[in-house]
Image (tube, helix red, strand yellow):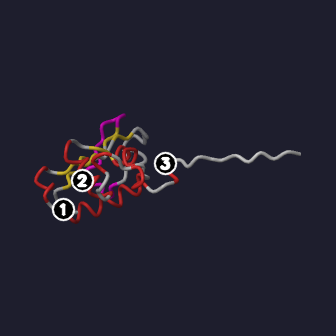
Amino acid sequence: MRFVSRIVPATPRALPAAAFFRGPFMEKTIRQAIVEALEGRPHSARQLAEALLLRPAEVEEHLEHIGRSMGGRLRLTPARCLACGYRFTERKRLSAPGRCPRCRGQKIAGPWFQVDGRASQRRV
């Protein structure tokens, strides 16, 4: 019987996200990179996670800290149901809801996050 050893290449998720920062993210912390991305236009936690090679839960933890440290300059556009239009305005958590309480649909868009332009000078 012959055994073949296979070398499994490291996937981007197996390595720290900081190893993959290129260009403008080269010398920034993860939170600084998130703030820089949110200054231009709104992004969801999932979009940020894909761009920074993190899990959405990790991005949500960083967003909570950014929200506290920036003095309310992190704007949140609430999630909404694509089936019936229900807006999750009273939701406190930053994660996306699983189902709509009105129609029980699972097609939920958002929430989206954005940083006011004045916040760029503040240290995160």
Q: Give residue 120's quadrant in the image.
A: bottom left
Residue 71 relative to residue 6: left or right:
left
Q: Nearer the viewer, mark 3 or mark 1?
A: 3
Q: Which residue is mark 1?
A: 70
Q: Position of residue 91 (x, y in %)?
A: 30, 55
Q: Nearer the viewer, mark 3 or mark 2?
A: 3
The quadrant of the image that shows the N terminus is top right
**For the point 30% across and 47% down, which residue is it?**
111
- Pick whichever, 11 or 23, lies toward us: 23
**Disc 3 and disc 1: Cα gap in Å?**
30 Å
Residue 123 relative to residue 82: left or right:
left
Q: Which residue is mark 3?
A: 12
Q: Position of residue 39 (x, y in %)?
A: 19, 47
Q: Please check the rendered image and state whether residue 93 is part of the magenta-colored stretch, yes or no.
A: yes
Q: Which residue is mark 2?
A: 35
Q: Are marks 3 and 2 in contact (CB under 8 Å)?
A: no
Tell me which amino acid carries mark 2.
Answer: Val
